[in-house]
Amino acid sequence: MAGMIDLVFERQGINLALLHDELTAVLGGKLVGLSQDGRAVRVHLLDSSTPDERKTVGEIVARHDGSRFTAAQQAERERQAALEALRKPWAQWSAADKDALLRLLAGELGLAVS
Amino acid sequence: MNWTIPKTWQVDELLTAADLNTHLRDNLNALKAPPTHVIWRDNGAAYSTTSTAFVPVDSANLKATLTTNGGDVLVWFWGVFHGDQVGRRVSLDIRVDGAGRLAAAYNGGLLTHRLSTTIGEEVVLGPVLISGLSAGEHTFELLWKTSDGVISLHADSDAPNDYDEVPAVLVAREVS
């Protein structure tokens, strides 16, 4: 696309959200985004990015660990785990369980729960 | 089969086999089977993007190519998308002949859809009629972007779940 260049890396096992965060930390607004098709990852950069920055992209993609999670993904995993822990008959619910559900619902409503 | 602008017949003009074949038979055949490209894309995996500017979904495989007779072209697409969080918005547009995009005046593209689940929901683009194309080869390429986070398009005939096991379908057909 106009004003952009794409760098393509044949890599699998990418956590796209995490790699996006890792590249944004270095490139800031020069990173337009990433795309993947299951075989390769395509890094969309503004064409104002420098050769050094493009080289850095390659290094970050090479050392990316797709088994790690972003903070948001980790929070979602914890939310799912908390929900899973509540899947039991009502008679078995403790006061702490009810408090945990309230926290989950408050989080859904965008209320502060910490 | 190419379309030929029908001739204007004159009074007492001799009907020749060549003229009838060209202007009736061939044109009827051309109307029966207009230039069409139907793509049922099985990528073997979902496509995903974090791009907040329009980029091609797949420049090689989600791009319809037609050799037209100079008529209008109808393009449409459907696919099943999901976001990594509820509320992600997927925007779609079409790039014609490798330049710009159809709805260039609109930041949201031809269509912006809010994904209300993280499992998958169908998004249909078009049909949209594209006019003003000269006779010859033209390409129609699907573009997408996300509002935030990761959005994915399912295109896999061997996905673990039935609701993921769907093609991404792009169609272009000359219609006039």
Image (cartoon, rainbow, N blue to C red):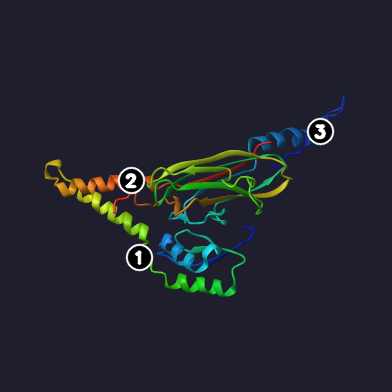
Q: Which residue is mark 2?
A: A108
Q: Secondary structure at mark 1?
A: loop
Chain containing the residue with disc 2: A
**Label 3: how many residues lie within 10 Å, few (<14), some (14-19) or many (20+)?**
few
The image shows residue B123 at horizontal and vertical percentages of: 48, 42
Residue A35 located left or right of residue B129: left
Identified by mark 1, the residue type is Arg
Residue labelled with disc 1: A68
Question: Which residue appears at 54% of the width and 74% of the height?
Answer: A55
Q: Which residue is mark 3?
A: B7
Mark 2–mark 3 Cα distance, whole angstroms, equals 68 Å
Q: CA distance from mark 2 to mark 1?
A: 25 Å
Q: Residue at 51% of width from left, 73% of height from top?
A: A56
Kindly identify which chain the residue marked by label 1 belongs to. Answer: A
Q: Which secondary structure lies at badge 3?
A: loop
In-image side of A89 versus A107 (left or right): left
> Foreground residue, B79 or B30?
B79
